[in-house]
Amino acid sequence: SEGKEPFVTFKCSDIAYDILKEQPGLRPAPYLASRGMKWIQRQTSQSMDDDALKDYLRESHRLVVLKLTKQARKELGLAAS
């Protein structure tokens, strides 16, 4: 609906998860976190500026790529970083 910000969900390190889950406007991502996965959901832009969010999204991408098989990375044109 109009005027509402989209929620943004991202994977993070154990340390970042422990810090971020306690911050206002951030929470463990529904479904994912309940299964022991370290994913955070940003519910409002006031909880984290865009530059910080971009950094977390880059790290999230890196963490996900690391878990892919070599074959999957090759098929997707991704290098392990």
Image (cartoon, rainbow, N blue to C red):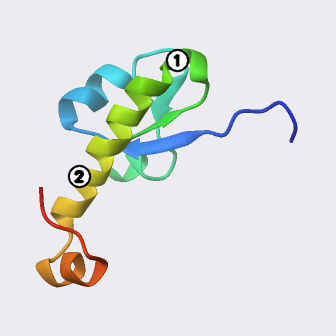
Residue 37 horizontal side relative to residue 41, left or right = left
Return the x and y of residue 8 as percentages of the image width and height. Answer: 54, 41
Q: Nearer the viewer, residue 70 or 19?
A: 70
Q: Which residue is mark 2?
A: 62
- Does residue 78 show up? yes
Tell me the amino acid under the disc marked 2: Arg
Q: Residues within 10 Å of mark 2 (few under 14, many from 20)?
A: some
Q: Is residue 11 above or below residue 67?
A: above
- Does residue 37 show up? no
Q: Which residue is mark 1?
A: 47
User: Residue drawn 30% across and 31% down?
Assistant: 17
Determine the CA span between mark 2 and mark 1. Answer: 23 Å
The quarter of the image holding the N terminus is top right
Q: Nearer the viewer, residue 32 or 50?
A: 50
User: Residue drawn 43% across and 31% down?
Assistant: 53
User: Residue drawn 26% across and 75% down?
Assistant: 77
The secondary structure type at the circle numbered 1 is helix
Q: Tag 1 or tag 2, which sits nearer the N-term?
A: 1
The quarter of the image holding the C terminus is bottom left
Which residue is farthest front? 77
Q: Residues within 10 Å of mark 1 (few under 14, many from 20)?
A: some
Return the x and y of residue 15 as percentages of the image width and height. Answer: 19, 28
Return the x and y of residue 49 as percentages of the image width and height. Answer: 49, 19
Tell me the amino acid under the disc marked 1: Ser
Q: Quadrant of residue 76?
A: bottom left
Residue 33 horizontal side relative to residue 60, left or right = right
